Image (tube, helix red, strand yellow):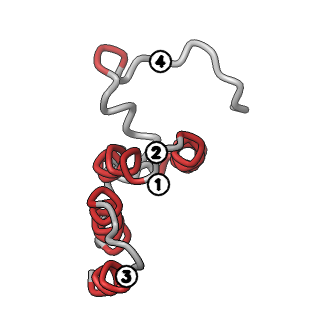
């Protein structure tokens, strides 16, 4: 925040409020000890107001989507690292959010037996 304050105070022209708030929230997101997807939701309205052209916003959101697609694929290929399967034993625990399908036998798979 000290760096952001220095930036604001040394700018040629007073920065817009949305731009300053975006930088403060982004600094919080980047320096917080945990990451939560809703932090990106906090940044979206500020990003739109701070930098109105949609092209920059779409590039940023595409980066977010690519990042999470990679994580979801990683969790599917290595279920022992899946944060939802908290017991660390993917063979013993089915989908905790599977509802009535939790524990149901697989009908068809492409894995080798």
Q: Distance between the residues labelled 1 and 2?
A: 38 Å
Q: Pointer 2: residues within 10 angstroms few (<14), some, or many (20+)?
A: few
What's the residue at 27%, 80% (across, down)? 1
Q: Which of marks 4 and 1 is in front?
A: 1
On the question of residue 69 being in view, the answer is no
Give the vertical position of 20 relative to 92 (above or below).
Answer: below
| Left or right relative to 81: residue 62 | right
Residue that badge 1 annotates: 81
What's the residue at 57%, 12% (across, down)? 107
Q: Pointer 1: residues within 10 angstroms few (<14), some, or many (20+)?
A: some
Question: Do tag 2 and tag 3 residues touch (Cβ < 8 Å)?
Answer: no
Q: Which mark is residue 105?
A: 4
Q: How far apart are marks 1 and 3 (CA)?
A: 41 Å
Residue that badge 2 annotates: 52
Q: Pointer 4: residues within 10 angstroms few (<14), some, or many (20+)?
A: few
Chain-order first, disc 1 or disc 2: 2
Residue that badge 3 annotates: 7
Asked whether 101 or 10 is in front, the reply is: 10
């Amino acid at each position: 925040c000290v760096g952001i304050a220095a930036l604001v105070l040394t700018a040629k022209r007073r920065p817009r409020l949305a731009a300053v708030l975006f930088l403060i929230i982004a600094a919080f997101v980047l320096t917080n000890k945990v990451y939560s997807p809703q932090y990106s939701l906090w940044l979206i309205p500020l990003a739109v107001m701070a930098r109105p052209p949609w092209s920059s916003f779409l590039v940023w959101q595409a980066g977010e989507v690519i990042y999470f697609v990679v994580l979801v694929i990683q969790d599917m290929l290595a279920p022992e690292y899946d944060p939802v399967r908290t017991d660390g034993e993917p063979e013993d625990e089915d989908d905790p959010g599977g509802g009535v399908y939790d524990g149901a036998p697989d009908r068809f798979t492409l894995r080798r037996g």
